[in-house]
Image (spheres, rainbow, N blue to C red):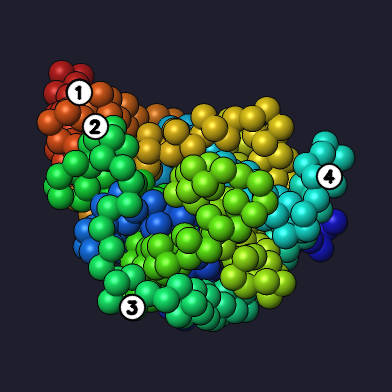
Amino acid sequence: MSNITNNTDDHALESVPDSERQSWIKLTWGTTGIVTTLVQLFVGALATFVAGFWIGVISGVGVAIIGGLLGWAVGNVAYKTGLSSSVLARYHGFGRKGSTIVALVFGFMIIGFIALENVLLYKGFLFWSNQPDSESLRFGFYSVLTVSWILLTAYGFKQVTAFASITLLAFIAILLYLMVEVIQSSGQSWVDVFNFGAQLPPEALAALGAESDVGKYVFCFNVMIGAAGALALIDADLGRYSKSTRDIGIAAGLGNLFMNVIMLVIGASVMYAGTTHLVDYYVAQGMSPEEAQNNVLNSPHSVAAAFIVFGGTVGAILLFLAQGKAQVLNTYSSSLSLTNIFDVIFDWRPGRVVFVVFANILACLMIYISILDWFSSFITTLGVLTTCISTIIISDFYLVSRWRSEKVVRSDYHWPGVITVFVSYVVSRHVLQDFIQIEFVTSVVVTFILYPSLCWLMKGRREINLVSAK
């Protein structure tokens, strides 16, 4: 265990030394590997089925640009400090104990993704093997997955990125193959596939606020921007290994390009061109045509089905490899958050391998208590919170740190950061939601105004107190 612990504890609570810094090529295996998943393919299909292909693509390009800049800005802070997202929050925006807010929000989100991806793998396995669902099968399958993620993550950052690089290349290759095969077998032209309109009925679009082109764009933007906030914090966890500002900037940009454009285009085209085949397949399995159509349009499991229906055994294998690389990276980031939480709250540093295990146990617990339905609806909220957190770190490092006292932010709680997260969330999600429907805009604007203002007021108050004391 001591050898594994030494390999795993890759500077979880300290700055990464220059000797271990990586180029953008190696960092990109992580930033792109963690977003090339079934969930992102489904998000691409969902966004374009609501808005139509080109509105979805235009929205994805916008999110990729904003997300890339956000990820570069936060990742650059990590590069400069050498610290992971939750640890650098101690010194930029939140204070030592306040950083647990960052670790809890980010850790909960990433552990939830571990659970979601595990469920998708299980559903894909049932689909491929034609096995009936049972408690014993679930227990055995999730146990194997959990042990796999723990062992694959327990050997440090270099092995994580090496695993991601191998599976990423294979996954992209099979995705492109599937896209060409599905479009050609559908009898549709490439022009038709890349120009389809909204696929949902008018009443469903009305319920989503996507009746007009503007409403469709807003829907797509809100669906995709939440992941950009989370990816920005992942960029920090990986960016602490960067050799330069340029390296983490390229890695962050490519991660957002893959997540919001490439995966969207592939997910949209495969699911649109393959809808008829999938519906026929589900009908052959005993579903009614209405149930089959609904299953294709509304369930992430349909993406797993597409892999298996169109890719056969090779598709099934690549499905597991694709999810596997993301699960390793998810486990990596979530264990960093848990390491910070237990260090700050309990002053307990057992070694990060303990938290690699703990993160996967928590993911299994989320599945067992059926929290995932609630978690799925909570992702938008988590997206607003992670975006706000990223903006606070950025504004503190690039602006506020120029004039604030170091003693202020090194206290247990840096209250301007804590207060800003709460206020930004309430204003974005509840106060101005009907007026500014793109919640990211509200969150960023409120944070950039409120956080520096509160820091300035705190600075002025301290100066007054010092004068009074004299």
Assess disc 4: are there few (<14), some (14-19) or many (≥20) residues with their C-alpha within 10 Å of its C-alpha.
some
Residue 65 vertical placement versus 12 (above, below):
below
In three-dimensional space, the C-alpha distance between marks 2 and 1, rounded to whole angstroms, equals: 6 Å
Q: Residue at x 53, y 42 (%)?
A: 291
- In this rendered view, identify the residue nearer to me: 335 or 328: 328
Circle 3 is placed at which residue position? Answer: 190
Q: Residue at x 48, y 48 (%)?
A: 293
Q: Are marks 2 and 3 in contact (CB under 8 Å)?
A: no
Residue 443's x, y, as percent?
Answer: 23, 38
Q: Are marks 4 and 2 in contact (CB under 8 Å)?
A: no
Circle 1 is placed at which residue position? Answer: 431
**Res 81 seen here:** no
Q: Name which of mark 1 and mark 3 comes first in the sequence.
A: 3
Q: Is residue 437 left or right of residue 48?
A: left
Q: Name which of mark 1 and mark 4 comes first in the sequence.
A: 4
Q: Are marks 2 and 1 in contact (CB under 8 Å)?
A: yes
In three-dimensional space, the C-alpha distance between marks 1 and 4, rounded to whole angstroms, equals: 46 Å
Q: Quadrant of the N terminus?
A: bottom right
Foreground mark, 2 or 3? 3
Assess disc 1: are there few (<14), some (14-19) or many (≥20) residues with their C-alpha within 10 Å of its C-alpha.
few
